[in-house]
């Protein structure tokens, strides 16, 4: 995926595969920071950062955070 991204601009729409990949990469960065995959795969890291900063991702993240807090508080 890193190789395919190259310098091409990101598309304005996301597939289910794009969403799954972005979430999996975010999980890796959170749980296994020692992998430092962002340093090795810079294009992929840039793409992932673009995806997770989208307003749609931010909105669902806020929703999930509230849900988790209400379940475990």
Image (tube, helix red, strand yellow):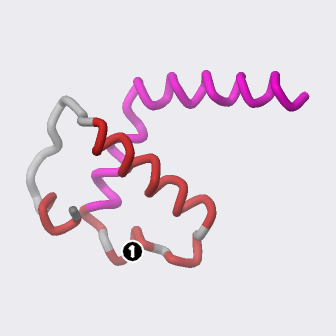
Along the line of sight, the residue nearer the viewer: 25 or 54: 25
Position of 36 with respect to 49 (left or right) is right
Q: Residue at x 11, y 58 (%)?
A: 7
Residue 62 lies in the magenta-colored region:
yes
Along the line of sight, the residue nearer the viewer: 54 or 17: 17
Residue at mark 1: 39
Q: Residue at x 44, y 57 (%)?
A: 25
Total numbered badges shown on the rendered structure: 1
Please give the range of residues in magenta. 44-73
Up/down of 17 relative to 73, above or below: below
Residue 43, quarter of the rendered image: bottom left
Residue 28 place in picture, x, y as percent: 52, 62
Q: Which secondary structure lies at badge 1?
A: helix
Magenta part, dominant SS: helix
Residue 23 lies in the magenta-colored region:
no
Residue 40 place in picture, x, y as percent: 34, 77
Other-residue count near label 1 (Cα within 10 Å), few / some / many at <14 / 14–19 / ≥20:
few
Q: Residue at x 34, y 60 (%)?
A: 45
Residue 73, quarter of the rendered image: top right
Residue 8 place in picture, x, y as percent: 9, 52
Up/down of 5 relative to 65, above or below: below
Position of 60 with respect to 54 (left or right) is right
Locate the N terminus and report the quarter of the image it occupies.
bottom left
Up/down of 66 relative to 25, above or below: above
Q: Which residue reaches farthest right?
A: 73
Residue 49 place in picture, x, y as percent: 38, 49
């Amino acid at each position: 995926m890193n190789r395919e991204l190259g310098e091409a601009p990101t598309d304005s729409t996301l597939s289910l595969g794009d969403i799954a990949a972005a979430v999996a990469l975010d999980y890796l960065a959170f749980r296994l920071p020692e992998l430092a995959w962002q340093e090795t795969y810079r294009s992929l890291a840039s793409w992932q950062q673009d995806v997770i900063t989208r307003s749609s991702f931010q909105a669902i993240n806020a929703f999930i955070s509230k849900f988790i807090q209400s379940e475990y508080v």
